Image (cartoon, coloured by chain):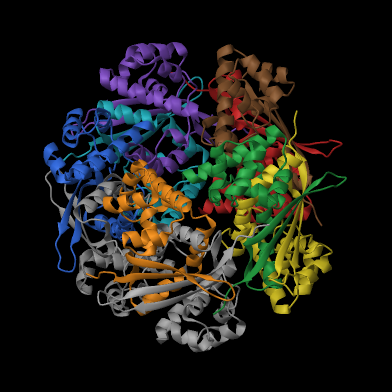
Chain colours: B blue, C cyan, D purple, E red, F brown, G yellow, H green, I orange
Amino acid sequence: MSDRIARLDAGREVVRAKDRLGISWQQLADELGHSLVHTTAALLGQQPLSANEAEKVGTMLELDEEIVEDLALPPVRGEAALDPTEPVTYRLQEALQVYGTSIHELIREEFGDGIMSAIDFSMTFEREPDPKGDRVKLVWSGKFLPYKVN
Amino acid sequence: MSDRIARLDAGREVVRAKDRLGISWQQLADELGHSLVHTTAALLGQQPLSANEAEKVGTMLELDEEIVEDLALPPVRGEAALDPTEPVTYRLQEALQVYGTSIHELIREEFGDGIMSAIDFSMTFEREPDPKGDRVKLVWSGKFLPYKVN
Amino acid sequence: MSDRIARLDAGREVVRAKDRLGISWQQLADELGHSLVHTTAALLGQQPLSANEAEKVGTMLELDEEIVEDLALPPVRGEAALDPTEPVTYRLQEALQVYGTSIHELIREEFGDGIMSAIDFSMTFEREPDPKGDRVKLVWSGKFLPYKVN
Amino acid sequence: MSDRIARLDAGREVVRAKDRLGISWQQLADELGHSLVHTTAALLGQQPLSANEAEKVGTMLELDEEIVEDLALPPVRGEAALDPTEPVTYRLQEALQVYGTSIHELIREEFGDGIMSAIDFSMTFEREPDPKGDRVKLVWSGKFLPYKVN
Amino acid sequence: MSDRIARLDAGREVVRAKDRLGISWQQLADELGHSLVHTTAALLGQQPLSANEAEKVGTMLELDEEIVEDLALPPVRGEAALDPTEPVTYRLQEALQVYGTSIHELIREEFGDGIMSAIDFSMTFEREPDPKGDRVKLVWSGKFLPYKVN
Amino acid sequence: MSDRIARLDAGREVVRAKDRLGISWQQLADELGHSLVHTTAALLGQQPLSANEAEKVGTMLELDEEIVEDLALPPVRGEAALDPTEPVTYRLQEALQVYGTSIHELIREEFGDGIMSAIDFSMTFEREPDPKGDRVKLVWSGKFLPYKVN
Amino acid sequence: MSDRIARLDAGREVVRAKDRLGISWQQLADELGHSLVHTTAALLGQQPLSANEAEKVGTMLELDEEIVEDLALPPVRGEAALDPTEPVTYRLQEALQVYGTSIHELIREEFGDGIMSAIDFSMTFEREPDPKGDRVKLVWSGKFLPYKVN
Amino acid sequence: MSDRIARLDAGREVVRAKDRLGISWQQLADELGHSLVHTTAALLGQQPLSANEAEKVGTMLELDEEIVEDLALPPVRGEAALDPTEPVTYRLQEALQVYGTSIHELIREEFGDGIMSAIDFSMTFEREPDPKGDRVKLVWSGKFLPYKVN
Amino acid sequence: MSDRIARLDAGREVVRAKDRLGISWQQLADELGHSLVHTTAALLGQQPLSANEAEKVGTMLELDEEIVEDLALPPVRGEAALDPTEPVTYRLQEALQVYGTSIHELIREEFGDGIMSAIDFSMTFEREPDPKGDRVKLVWSGKFLPYKVN
Amino acid sequence: MSDRIARLDAGREVVRAKDRLGISWQQLADELGHSLVHTTAALLGQQPLSANEAEKVGTMLELDEEIVEDLALPPVRGEAALDPTEPVTYRLQEALQVYGTSIHELIREEFGDGIMSAIDFSMTFEREPDPKGDRVKLVWSGKFLPYKVN
């Protein structure tokens, strides 16, 4: 349990520090040489950080050494890392409720029996300007994996 | 309860009929003049169909009149329409577990306190060719809605 | 996790302080220049407070500096912030059980396919004098958002 | 169980019939001499209808005699009558998550230790015109009931 | 969260102190001038205690000042205050499983559409001597509240 | 499963028949020679009825022979027989949430380590006239059973 | 909560101490003059211990005075005291899944409508030598309690 | 699903038939040459019956051929076969809550690291005469299985 | 819902037919030219069958044409297809509880950050003769998939 | 509770220490003379370690004496030791969802009515080289245990 809490708490410290210092996720991404979404996920505990990467972040955000060590712990993926009733999150889930069966059928028609990988997967985040109000644009890209037949 | 079952069952009949007749979701979308994902979602019970639209689909897919009527019932959105443990669906959920907090923080940094709408929302589905194996590409676009301050 | 606890605990400290000092929610609302319900929600952790707003509250309620800092953390919306079995809360939920499907059908008839926003939303709270016993009056106002058709 | 299903199914038949005949909830309310929300709730199974009232509705909506009988069954209140993940309903619940603790504290300050009744309770539903998009306005009015001290 | 824990823990301290000092719930009730069950419930965190009442109890039970302060916190009603699988509690729940639908129908027949209030409510606890083994006698008295028709 | 449904459905038929014929639970109790609450519980499937008793009820309420047979099936006690979110039932549960720990401590003080039986148990139901509004009075009487020490 | 944790933790200390000192549950039972299973259950927090009994155990196991005090707290029965997925426990539960309905029917045939008490109850634990592998033998003895008819 | 329902329903038919014909579980056990508890469990769907055994039971209880066939389906063990809130069943579960950790520790002390098998397992059921009220006596016997170390 | 039930019920019909006709899973696998486990899974609804394959099975097992059609429906993977409390299944789950964190750490050490695929996956089933009692041997083989870093 | 946390936390310390010192699970297994998987499971809290074994590990990994003591506590098997939504773990569970009913039927056909033991059980872990990407290979071996018939 304590690894999980240590890693997630370190992520919260990152958020507080970047807010305080006025550093953006993109600046952190540039420093680490990863994409925006991957970097954010890594700093929030969902992807691994090497000791070296943690060190860079620690310097940039003036973090305590203990926080830096915790950032290099293995990622803590899984349900406990997310509150599905938080309003931003809930709407993403709701979109899955509405479009999940469609995605399933569209994959079945286009690719056959298999899945869209959540491992060989990447996501981008973008502001989409729109005169009626700007939009959040997320692009999900996951490799199709066919079920093995033997 | 029976509306929900009627609507979802009508959707299953659509799937069986299009598989039997070799008609694609895109052909159905073209007939209705809606996008691919919206059409699929509507036929699977997640978006409304007018009586007229249901009729067109019924003719194209040689459906019984009763099925056509059920297709025009109000949509049945909500958790009961989706099995979150079905493997395709699960991986989408898992991607949310991994990236949900990141999306939350990125929206907060870029847009401020608010959400990505699941109502003023659209999604596209595409095959992304890739030499290492083709990929599923989903683009989510939702209007940013700021929390009202009063 | 710890942000959530810090923010909610800061809210409990606000309650204890205002009870001790005899300061009302309305006085706090006047100080901040927000409505009564928005102010209460913000102080209980459900809406954001700027550092400046937190400072004003801290002065008025003689709060420790640490509590003031915690009040300016991002809001912690979601299920974990509320005990749905607490008797006041439960009756509100029960009213939704009784009237929820009615609201759904009335919106569908009057506005069409869509929702009442919980984001572009405000609420007022009022004592409604009544000879048979005063009443609690809540006015909910949320923008209608139509489902996007594309 | 079967009472519940019979009553709720009768409600769905009412919806289908009024949609087919172009009769509004308000017309039904006028016929019964009750308010709009109370009438809608009663027809959807959440408030009682006398045999006489059920008969009037049956005539107006050309319902089968069996449906009319089912409409006069006792109401079927409780969680099973509502899908809390349906998007319209969910946003109402979410508003409670955000404002529930505020309502609790505001009642405690204004009225003392007690609740807002969900029994001696009424609700109105209204379209609130707004240049930025019309709004749904709900007014909740419930008698304050103080906890008995003895 | 911490209010709840503070209030319930204060209740446990009351139990330990009264056991140690040989003081009965009835003696505490006499001191406070409330009924036996109301007093017990208040001291266990389910009904309010004024600062003055808390002080009296603190003196009688030689409690620390901090515990006395916690006793005057608002009550912490709700599911989290009770373990429904504790054997004494479970049997009360089981009695509701067996007699709940009967009470519902008997109220409906005798009073009409409405509820037995849990707010305008009182309970007594008594030992009922019986040659075959003494019995626990609980009398529940709650005001009938008719559903409002409008 | 089917026994349970058969027995509970037979109970619903009893309710419909007695409502239609204007026969009260007390008249049924007098016919069977049992108390009011026990009779109601038995007819709703929570206590046993002999074939002879079922026959008497069938004659009085003009029930089909099949219903009469189902009334003599073994009782179907347990959670599935009751909807705890039904508003009448919920308030009884809520009273247990508020007073459950008190009953536990009062039994422990008065009787020692043990329980109030839900088997050697009886309940009465009564209308308690009150100028401020009549009350529902329930008397619960259960034998105290001490934990066996060996 | 803290009573429960204190009592259960005291039980874990008993286990560690008896393992360290090589003292068996039977020796503890002999010291207290209770049966083997009752003693074990009492020391693990499921049956009461008098202050005197706790003192004897404390001396025998060289426990801290605080642990001794905690052992004399009221028992903490209920679901939270047991992990039903722990493999030893699970198999006992599974046996109930397989034989529970049989026990129910056998009691109904042999004794009539009623239960096997879990309060006027005792259990023995024994090693049953067997050439094909020794067996665990548990004898459950509970008083039959007939449902009260009134 | 349908196997489970068929097998369990066949078991209910066995109960109705034996009640109607006045045949006891022991007589059925004698006919099949199995123990009382094993026979009861087999007839209620928890242990297998050969086609030949099902035939014998069918003749003795005058069952329809279809029921006899269903009795020979594979057993349907698992949670869905049992209602854990049924009062007889619940008390058995409660005894596990009270004594489960004791059994675990007693097995660990006496046998070492391992379990009491629920597969190489048998149970007897007996009426234990007692002047203070007869008792239900269950003897559980399960082979000890040590965890494999490799 | 009905696809799922149709497909799973078709699987139960396969089991009954092969038991009645004395045909083994291996014979069915040989007929279809797939491995033993894949064939069994496909026939039980977890992998796809072509119309042609379903036809072959139908002929071999003398199935009705409707069952044959249902066998060719899409697979119905997900939690609802399995009862995790069924004793055979439970022990597999328990093995995961005991060894799951070990597999996680061993994969992390040997392969790095990633998963063992459940899609590019196969399993074999074998009887492993052993003088102390034959054993069930399962070999799981899943491709390692590294988390994408971008 | 605290045993469980102590044991699992000790396991996390083992992971951190071996990562820091570059010691592999296989080296630890060789030191203890157990298999790779058994050793890993034991160090992660799922199998017992003698005081002597804990000491050896402590020396090799330079652990604090307190950690060493905690490693020798009894194992803490059960659901709470594993997060089933962690992606590696989830895929193992999903494989059970897909193949669980097949394993059940294959055991029933090959061995008869019984289970694959999770106690007399062992597992191996291996990297399976594959030109299309190396694979994780797990071999599960569990003794078949027939249900006892008596």
Q: Is residue G60 left or right of residue C133?
A: right
| Quadrant into which the C terminus of chain C falls | top left
**Residue E58 appears in the figure:** no
Q: Residue, x 55% and y 33% (percent of image)?
A: F5
Give the x, y percent position of residue B68: 24, 31
Residue situated in front as seen by the camera: C122 or B64: B64
Residue situated in front as seen by the camera: B95 or G146: G146
Residue situated in front as seen by the camera: C58 or C15: C15
Give the x, y percent position of residue C144: 25, 34
Q: Is residue F28 left or right of residue B87?
A: right
Q: Height in image: E132 above or below B116?
A: above
Residue situated in front as seen by the camera: G120 or F73: F73
The answer to which image quadrant residue G136 occupies is bottom right
Give the x, y percent position of residue E17: 72, 54
| Quadrant into which the N terminus of chain C falls | bottom left
Give the x, y percent position of residue G13: 67, 70
